[in-house]
Amino acid sequence: MQNSQPWVEKYRPRKVKDVAHQDEVVRVLTNTLETADCPHMLFYGPPGTGKTTTALAISHQLFGPELYKTRVLELNASDDRGINVVRTKIKDFASVAVSTGHHPGPYPCPPFKIIILDEADSMTEDAQNALRRTMETYSKVTRFIFICNYISRIIEPLASRCAKFRFKSLPDDILSTRVLHVCNEENLHLDTKSLSTLGSISQGDLRRAITYLQSAARLYGSSISSENLISVSGIIPQVVVETLFNVCKVGNFDDADAEVSNIIAEGYPVSQMFSQLFELIVGSDDISDEQKAKICKRMAEADKCLIDGANEYLQLMDVASFTMRVLSNMSQQMCF
Amino acid sequence: MLWVDKHRPRALDKVIVHEEIAQNLKMLVSEQDCPHLLFYGPTGSGRKTLVMALLKQMFGTSAEKVKLENKNWKIDTGTRTIEVELTTLSSTNHVELNPSDAGFQDRYVVQEIIKEMAKSRPIDAKGKKGFKVLVLNEVDKLSREAQHSLRRTMEKYSSSCRLILCCSSSSKVTEAVRSRCLNIRVNAPTNDQIIRVLEFIAKKEKLQLPSTLAARIAVQSNRSLRKAILSFETCKVQNYPFTDDQVVPPMDWEQYVCEIVSDIMKEQSPKRLFLVRGKLYELLINCIPPGFILKNLLSELLKKLDDELKHEVCHWAAHYEHRMQLGQKAIFHLEAFVAKFMSIYKEFLIATFG
Ligand SMILES: Nc1ncnc2c1ncn2[C@@H]1O[C@H](COP(=O)(O)OP(=O)(O)OP(=O)(O)O)[C@@H](O)[C@H]1O
Ligand SMILES: [Mg+2]
């Protein structure tokens, strides 16, 4: 049968013990499987590190496919989770009593339900506040699992009721092991160089690594080079970044303008340009620390403007022009 | 039909400019398990053409039988019902829409439509369940909330629904969404590529196109293929047979911006500012995006200035454009920029010439 799921889904671990690198949570949950009890939990950490995977895996392992349907409620940012839903839908689900009777079969089936609130950082504060009561009132029959990228967006009273688990970025070696596993299953060949490239471009995010891998495999066949991976990753080629920086060093405004226009026409994302330019500038030996600091500060401001929706050409041009003035020790104060 | 539409390549094998991307796309969809796609690149670069050709590659000619509908969604939020109306373009296998048209309610559209589509999976000739494709345009204009609500949905319904996201600036798409897609950069065509397209169209229309004219059209288009083809067609209307030195008419509004700039350069006074305001309003009324106006003002001004002033003017343009994004009324910020420029320029004149 042809599988129509993308590889990230196909290779999503189904069992808690297969989740890589998050030892603490795996240990606690393995214990849960034996004792059939667990606390409320809060999973937080960067994208693609296994949070959703872990929550789904433990729920499936606790209840099995049949009971899962009635015992687990999964809500994510695409569901409406405003204050009203918290007061009605979540409360209704939480308040239902569960039978304590023994369920036949290999699953522990503990006498509680699980509510998974994925992407909880996009819930409003009001909705989170409304949850406090529900959590307390029904804690005998319901366990909550909150999942988010930024723990600071979860209000303290909720966070303090949970066992918190930080999901760590996956280090290169673990990432490589998982990637090699996929390669094996899909009959792909990766040499060591491409493997390390894949590690550095996906920055500890396994989902990204697998998506890049699949894209490269579709485009370039079963033998994948490190250039192939870079081209699917959206990273700006180093020469483009260096050219811009060199033009700024020379200091001719019109040349810089032409270069910036070219970058925009080529479609390179300016936020990505900023992060690569940042690395180049911080690492270069021929400019002073003070100059570096000034440029980086301006770049940070421009990056914020981009998030506000400002025009990419104008922001990059502003940074380029500022860099030129700093490097040629021209006055950075506006003259008029 | 305009030439831009008439000569739009329909199949991936027929594209003239992004041949490599097209070939890649073809391989990408050869299996059923292709990931979600995010197309990004400047406007007028041919993103849309690629997406349409891709749909045809996936679903055959049925992807071209589209119908335009005004769809109404009633969304029950518990206390009240929200009504959202949007125009969609759909075939049996795909739906295309601009969710950001729903304004701050875009989140509901994104939520509802994907679930709705996932429910009605098409069944192909062999009785297998296929997937539907949802094309979302201008995702860079989607609110943060709407982008957040895409995240898990993209995973959850990945076997029944494939997303094709399009935007001009991928900086404005959140990391979480970007990392769930294969990112495809569609660059603006180079002048040579534009010339090739113009020559292709000339051949189809049985026209004699002098190479110098083609080159000038390409340069003036600023690497926008759409603009090049539009002005090529205008040239044909104005004067055929073509001559080597015939004028390539600029877009009306660009001409108008040039006028504004020469107004500004001639006199810097409150009276002149008042005059300019009227002209800026004129542009806004004709639906020219304010960001375009500001950027064109800047590039016309830069042509007339000394280097030291260029830095300064460029900085203020970035400054006011940013404020414009945060604010509500574009005219305030456009006018503020013009006023700022006038004051800088006047002081510069006084300092230099006394
Ligand atoms: N620790 C891990 N062990 C094994 N596979 C992983 C791990 N982390 C991520 N993956 C892979 O990456 C994919 C995405 O992981 P998951 O959905 O759990 O990310 P997440 O932490 O929920 O990210 P987000 O914050 O973006 O929602 C999974 O399908 C799986 O293939
Ligand atoms: Mg997740």
Image (tube, rainbow, N blue to C red):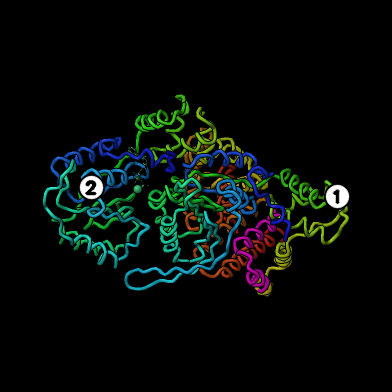
Tell me, yes or no, whether the highlighted magenta stretch contains residue A276.
no
Mark 2 chain: A
Rendered-image quadrant of the C terminus of chain B: bottom right
Can residue A308 be seen at all in this image of the molecule? yes
Near-viewer residue (B140 or B352): B140
Residue A282 drawn at (x, y percent)? 48, 38
The reply, left or right, for residue A213 in relation to residue B60 is left
Residue span colored magenta: B278-306
Task: Name the residue: 29% across, 65% down.
Answer: A85
Q: Residues within 10 Å of mark 1 (few under 14, many from 20)?
A: few
Mark 1 residue element: loop
User: In the rendered structure, which amino acid carries the disc numbered 1?
Assistant: Gln
The residue carrying pointer 2 sits among few (fewer than 14), some (14 to 19) or many (20 or more) residues within 10 Å by Cα, namely some
User: Relative to residue B48, is residue B160 drawn left or right?
Assistant: left
Indicate the position of residue B303 as horizontal and vertical percent values: 71, 54
Q: Nearer the viewer, mark 2 or mark 1?
A: 1
Residue B283 painted magenta:
yes
Q: Chain of mark 1?
A: B
Residue at position x 58%, y 67% in the image: B336
In the displayed image of the protein, which residue is found farthest to the left?
A101
Q: Which residue is mark 1?
A: B208
Residue corresponding to mark 2? A164
| Viewer-proximal residue among A244 and A84 | A84
Disc assigned to residue A143: none
| Left or right side of A324 for A94 | left
Query: Which residue does the image show at 18% across and 62% down from the upper left?
Result: A95
Considering depth in this image, is A38 or B224 the residue closer to the camera? A38
Left or right, A228 with respect to B313, comes to left
Can residue A205 be seen in this snapshot? no
Query: Quadrant of the image for the N terminus of chain B?
Result: bottom right
